Each structure stands twice: as C-alpha cells, then as structure tokens.
Image (tube, helix red, strand yellow):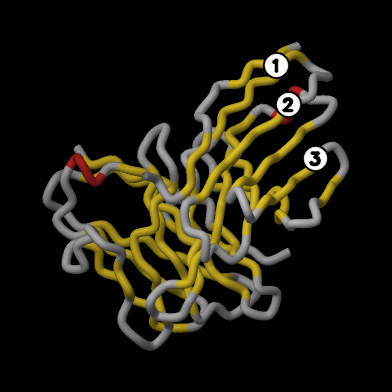
C-alpha cells in the first residue's frame, strides 16, 4: 500500500464549480499535512497546510481527519487558473531524526471555460 | 520570500557521462536539503537527504555510488548522476528547509535527458 494515496483524476469541471479532492495516508505517525500545487513541468508549490480544526484560505478549504487518516481539499468557484495537479503531502520523521515530505501521486484538475 | 535555485534547468547528455546539478538556498541557510526525482505522471520520490558537513542519507533503492551528493556549505548541495543511462532521464527537484520558518522550499527542478 502506498504511503499517501490520491485519486489521479483527471477532474474536469466547468468554471465556477466546486470540486473536492481526497487523500488517505497509511502512517499513523505522520506529523504534518499539506496540499501542494504543481503545474506542468514545474516544481511543486505549497498551497496550504492542513489542520485537524480545518483551515480556509479564500476559495480553498482543507480538512484533516486523523482518526480516519484522511485529508481533503475543497475548491469553490473554480477558476481556469486552478488547473493543475494537486499533491497531498505528509511528513514523517526519518531514522536520522529529520523530517521528510512524502508526496501522493497527485490529482489532476482541469477547469474548463 | 525564500528562494531556492537549481542549475542547470535542463541538460541533455550522452549515456555514460556524469551530470552535476546544483541546488542553492539564496536567502537562508539550510542544514538539510532534499533531492527528489519525478518521472512523468508520477509523484515526487525522495532520493536522499543532504546534510551539511556529513554524509547524505539515501532512501531504500537509491544507489549512493551512482547519485553522489555533496553538501559542502549551508547554502549549496550538489547531486552528481554518474555514468548516466537513459533510464536516469527524469525531473530532479531539490528542496531546502528553512529551520527558522520551519518550511521547506523547492527549487525549480532540473530536467535531465540521457540519450
């Protein structure tokens, strides 16, 4: 089983739609959680952190359910510029005591006019 | 904001040659840098953790003699792909941790094509 699993999509939605992405992680010791956005042939960029209490940043809402080991991202009022791959990321402590990011394979979103 | 640079952004080389990729943190010191590899339509896979002043820590399945990592200063880590083969063609991305902000920043990536 992969450490972080996501539906690869693609999700094709019209402008203005609301779309939700889900992610599950297998390591219950995971410490921190993030959503990253990656545009084609570019590096990933941090979109937002994810907290158990849920957090919102404009049109984006992220939620974490530790009991179910489940993370979600909700995008409201989709824009064409939201088209990208969304990566679910968790951190884990390595044997060295340092933290490392583990990436899901990403969910592709295509917003259509 | 913090910036991480990578050089070169793109490289094409012949099979059997070695390629060096540099990763620099431009406005913060990074005791730890990470090297990732991403094949088309796949996730970023951590290859190794680069530790300033000490040996890199490699992930399982990554050959340390093939992917040489040197973290000689607090702002520079290099990854050398030795005796490159076509299957090494990939997108290599580094990241650096800003301890002060407890945040990891990614470089723009290096696209390696081995002919």
Asked if residue A27 lies left or right of residue A79, the reply is left
The chain carrying label 1 is A
SS state under label 3: strand
Q: How crowded is mark 2: few (under 14 residues within 10 Å), some or many (20 or more)?
A: some
Q: Mark 2 points at which residue?
A: A19
Mark 3 or mark 1, which has the lower sequence index? 1
Q: Can residue B6 be spotted in the picture?
A: no
Q: Mark 3 points at which residue?
A: A60
SS state under label 2: strand
Q: In this view, does A21 lie above or below B56?
A: above
Asked if residue A111 lies left or right of residue B86, the reply is right
| Residue A38 in the image, given as x and y percentages of width and height | 58, 40
**Which labelled disc corresponds to residue A13?**
1
Q: Is residue A10 above or below residue A6?
A: above
Between B11 and B53, the residue placed more toward the observer is: B53
| Residue B100 in the image, given as x and y percentages of width and height | 68, 80
């Amino acid at each position: 089983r992969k450490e972080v699993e996501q539906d690869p999509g693609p999700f094709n939605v019209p402008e203005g739609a609301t779309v939700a992405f889900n992610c599950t992680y297998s390591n219950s010791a995971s410490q921190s959680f993030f959503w990253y956005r990656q545009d084609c042939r570019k590096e990933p960029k941090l979109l937002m952190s994810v907290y158990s209490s849920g957090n919102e940043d404009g049109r984006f809402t992220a939620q974490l359910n530790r009991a179910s080991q489940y993370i979600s991202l909700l995008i409201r009022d989709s824009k064409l510029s939201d088209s990208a791959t969304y990566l679910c990321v968790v951190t884990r402590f390595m044997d060295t005591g340092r933290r490392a990011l583990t990436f899901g394979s990403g969910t592709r979103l295509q917003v259509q006019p | 904001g913090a910036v991480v640079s990578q050089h070169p952004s793109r490289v094409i080389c012949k099979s059997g040659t070695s390629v060096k990729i540099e990763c620099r943190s431009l406005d913060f010191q990074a005791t730890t840098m990470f090297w990732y590899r991403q094949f088309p339509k796949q996730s970023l896979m951590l290859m190794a953790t680069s530790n300033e002043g000490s040996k890199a820590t490699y992930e399982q399945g990554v050959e340390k003699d093939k992917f040489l990592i040197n973290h000689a200063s607090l702002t520079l880590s290099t990854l050398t792909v030795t005796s490159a083969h076509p299957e090494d063609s990939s997108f290599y991305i580094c990241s650096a941790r800003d301890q002060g902000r407890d945040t990891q920043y990614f470089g723009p990536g290096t696209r390696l094509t081995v002919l």
